[in-house]
Image (cartoon, rainbow, N blue to C red):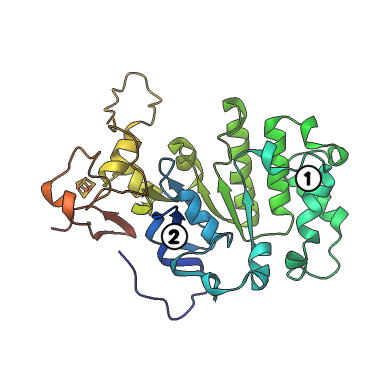
């Protein structure tokens, strides 16, 4: 499923990634955390990536954020190929791409006041070079505190003095401070109480509209993905097995793995019968993946060919693709 190598940049696209592989060493064994992943992300697009733990979602976003390097493959951010740049040349990425992590208790330094936490990215020498000269840190602090609906007086308090939802607002404010183009969120609401998850999702949605941000976020909760994304990527054991618009994928999931994930979404109407597809067993180890289609050990549609031959990518049209032997024969 490797796409042709890119030769010229496109202004509209923020990210282009092709043929991304990431292999780690575990003792004498090699663990392939990411296999031949490709994607594009346009300015203002909201891509949600779903998949079980161990599917390679976190590895993918770490590579896109410049926090990890692919073993092979290419990643372009706007007109620069970031997969080949040295750390000291990634300053533009540190300013343009910010991350929000799952648990604000561990992502916020408990010894720093909120004002220090939020303005810290502005002090980073890598980020500073990308910002207009003379950025007033106090003014920017006031702006982002207002953006996330926190009073400015709260800026002199410490993270432990806030609730979980407020701490995630602080983490979002920190991410917004350098005026990024892209926000990457790694399970941004899964550590929060259900009662406040909706508030944070609505906040992220409002901020995206207000600032025209490009979103890339991962979640195991499909109702979150449905709410916030316009494009969905489904990952399984390091592979992007289905990718397309939210409308197409939610209306007609094609890959048996996507169908199983989506069959578990609760129905708002209790009178509607759910046809839940139960996945047998857990995701196999990336250190010893199954042959052929990696999903064949759990797939209810498995055929003989699936056990030996790796399926090819099938283009279902409208930028929707699926990697499965059921299609394109
Ligand atoms: Fe199932 Fe075969 Fe498709 Fe894999 S290739 S998802 S095993 S039908």
Residue drawn at point x = 48 percent, y = 56 percent: 60
Residue 104 screen position, x and y as percent:
67, 39
Residue 202 screen position, x and y as percent:
60, 39
Q: In this view of the protein, which residue sits in the foreground, 66 or 151?
A: 66
Residue drawn at point x = 70 percent, y = 40 percent: 169
Identify the secondary structure beneath mark 2.
strand
Please name the residue that numbered disc 1 is placed on: 145
Identify the secondary structure beneath mark 1.
helix
Quarter location, residue 94: bottom right
In the rendered image, which quarter contains the C terminus?
Answer: bottom left
- Label of residue 69 in the image: none
Eyeballing the image, is 304 above or below 319? above
In the rendered image, which quarter contains the N terminus?
Answer: bottom left
Q: In this view of the protein, which residue sits in the foreground, 288 or 267?
A: 288
Please name the residue that numbered disc 2 is placed on: 22
Residue 122 screen position, x and y as percent:
78, 59
Crowdedness near tag 2: few (<14), some (14–19) or many (≥20) residues, C-alpha within 10 Å? many
In the image, 4: left or right of 41? left
Residue 155 screen position, x and y as percent:
84, 41
Q: Between tags 1 and 2, which lies in front?
A: 2
Q: In this view of the protein, which residue sits in the foreground, 249 or 303?
A: 303
Q: Is residue 46 visible?
A: no
Residue at the front extreme of this rendering? 28
Q: In this view of the protein, which residue sits in the foreground, 16 or 160?
A: 160
Q: How many marks?
A: 2
Eyeballing the image, is 261 above or below 6? above
Eyeballing the image, is 24 above or below 6? above
Crowdedness near tag 1: few (<14), some (14–19) or many (≥20) residues, C-alpha within 10 Å? many
Quarter location, residue 111: top right
Residue at the top extreme of this rendering? 271
In the image, 169: left or right of 259? right
């Amino acid at each position: 499923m490797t796409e042709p190598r890119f030769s010229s940049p496109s202004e509209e696209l923020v990210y282009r990634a092709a043929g991304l592989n990431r292999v780690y060493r575990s003792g004498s064994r090699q663990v392939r955390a990411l296999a031949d992943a490709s994607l594009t992300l346009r300015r203002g697009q909201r891509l949600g990536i779903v998949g079980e733990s161990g599917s390679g979602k976190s590895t993918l976003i770490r590579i896109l954020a410049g926090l990890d390097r692919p073993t092979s493959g290419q990643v372009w951010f706007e007109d620069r190929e970031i997969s080949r740049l040295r750390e000291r040349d990634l300053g533009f990425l540190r300013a343009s791409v910010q991350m929000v992590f799952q648990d604000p208790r561990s992502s916020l330094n408990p010894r720093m006041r909120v004002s220090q936490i939020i303005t810290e990215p502005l002090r980073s020498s890598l980020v500073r070079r990308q910002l207009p000269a003379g950025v007033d840190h106090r003014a920017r602090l006031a702006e982002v505190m207002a953006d996330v609906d926190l009073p400015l007086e709260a800026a002199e308090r410490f993270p432990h003095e806030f609730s979980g939802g407020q701490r995630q607002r602080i983490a979002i404010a920190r991410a917004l401070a350098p005026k990024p183009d892209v926000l990457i969120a790694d399970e941004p609401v899964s550590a929060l109480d259900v009662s406040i998850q909706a508030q944070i999702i609505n906040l992220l949605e409002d901020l995206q509209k207000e600032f025209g941000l490009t979103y890339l976020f991962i979640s195991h909760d499909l109702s979150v993905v449905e709410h916030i994304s316009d494009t969905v990527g489904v990952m399984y054991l390091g592979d992007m097995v289905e990718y397309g618009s939210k409308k197409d994928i939610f209306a007609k999931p094609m890959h048996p793995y996507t169908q199983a994930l989506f069959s578990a979404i609760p129905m708002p109407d209790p009178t509607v019968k759910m046809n839940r597809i139960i996945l047998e067993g857990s995701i196999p180890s990336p250190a010893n993946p199954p042959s052929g289609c990696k999903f064949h050990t759990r797939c209810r549609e498995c055929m003989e060919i699936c056990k030996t031959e790796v399926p090819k990518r099938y283009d279902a049209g409208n930028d929707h693709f699926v990697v499965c032997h059921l299609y394109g024969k």
